[in-house]
Image (spheres, rainbow, N blue to C red):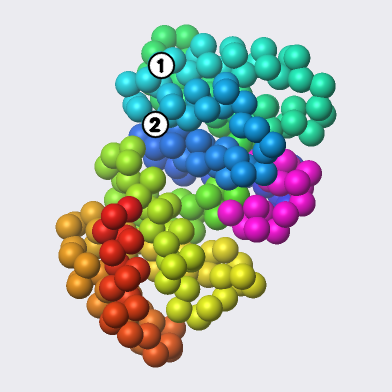
């Protein structure tokens, strides 16, 4: 993990492994991990999130980059400068994904993992470290998921399922002590079920099967149905 903070080539590998169709969404997710650690989210960042949420708005990210750059130029907080530099990169790759003329440098996204983890160090919160790391590496750890991406919304749904398994399912009861990626190996299968239109019963039975036959816990169908309902709504 320390290598990501210093080696831009590793950042390049991570970024290039993210499907082009969801690169803005991925970058926005990384940036949004810091939201609750800020005293106030700058309006320029909120506007960037709004742009990322709608593909047809991605072309507006060039002007949004300028706004964020101007904010950074007037900023006097050395630590916050790193956060804004991260946001600048997010705006750049969002504009590049719009395929408009005069794109930013093709390597604009390579530093996103590095800047994100460096800013984590400044905040020094283990939960944040785990969240940022799991988001950055979401395509590294789940190779099969990359092939399932067909729409920009897929990444959002996938991350919601990841959060649900960690927060609501947690069959071992370790989400306050274990690494954040404890259940990420099970997310692709649940994601595929949801994407293929599985109902709550099918999803709940799969969760129960994982609990009993892979993890070795004695879960119940009723408990898994509660989790399945959250996944259906994701």
Asked if residue 126 is among those painted magenta in the image, a careful observer would answer yes
Residue at x-position 32% and y-position 60%: 231
Q: Residues within 10 Å of mark 1 (few under 14, many from 20)?
A: many
Q: Does 169 sit above or below residue 20? A: below
Residue at x-position 75% and y-position 27%: 81
Q: Nearer the viewer, residue 87 or 11?
A: 87
Q: Which mark is residue 53?
A: 2
Residue at x-position 22% and y-position 67%: 200
- Comparing labels 2 and 1, the label whose residue is closer to the camera: 2
Q: Nearer the viewer, residue 149 or 170?
A: 170
Mark earlier in primary sequence (2, 1): 2
Residue at x-position 66% and y-position 54%: 129
Where is residue 18 shown, x and y percent of the image? 45, 42
Determine the main secondary structure of the stretch shown in magenta.
Answer: helix
Q: Which mark is residue 59?
A: 1
Q: Residues within 10 Å of mark 2 (few under 14, many from 20)?
A: some
Q: Secondary structure at mark 1?
A: helix
For the question of whether residue 192 can be seen, the reply is no
For the question of whether residue 128 can be seen, the reply is yes
Where is residue 133 shown, x and y percent of the image? 60, 53
Relative to 68, is 165 on the left or the right?
A: left
Where is residue 150 shown, x and y percent of the image? 27, 42
Q: Secondary structure at mark 2?
A: helix
Quote the CA–CA distance across marks 2 and 1: 12 Å
Please state the extent of the stretch shown in magenta in the rendering. 115-131
Q: Does 203 sit above or below residue 138? A: below
């Amino acid at each position: 993990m320390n290598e990501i903070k210093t080696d831009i080539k590793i950042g390049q590998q991570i970024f290039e492994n993210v499907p082009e169709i969801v690169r803005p969404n991925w970058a926005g997710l990384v940036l949004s991990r810091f939201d609750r650690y800020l005293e106030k989210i700058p309006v320029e960042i909120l506007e960037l999130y709004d742009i990322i949420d709608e593909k047809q708005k991605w072309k507006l990210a060039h002007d949004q980059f300028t706004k964020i750059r101007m904010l950074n130029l007037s900023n006097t907080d050395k630590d916050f400068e790193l956060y804004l530099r991260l946001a600048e990169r997010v705006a750049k790759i969002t504009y590049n994904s719009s395929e408009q003329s005069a794109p930013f440098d093709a390597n604009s996204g390579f530093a996103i993992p590095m800047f994100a983890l460096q800013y984590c160090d400044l905040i020094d919160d283990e939960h944040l470290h785990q969240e940022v790391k799991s988001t950055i590496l979401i395509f590294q750890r789940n190779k099969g998921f990359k092939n399932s991406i067909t729409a920009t919304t897929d990444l959002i749904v996938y991350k919601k399922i990841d959060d649900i398994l960690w927060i609501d399912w947690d069959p071992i009861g370790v989400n306050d002590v274990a690494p954040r990626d404890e259940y990420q190996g099970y997310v692709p299968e649940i994601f595929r079920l949801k994407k293929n239109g599985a109902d709550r019963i099918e999803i709940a039975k799969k969760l129960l099967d994982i609990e009993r036959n892979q993890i070795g816990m004695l879960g119940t169908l009723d408990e898994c149905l509660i989790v399945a309902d959250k996944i259906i709504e994701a």
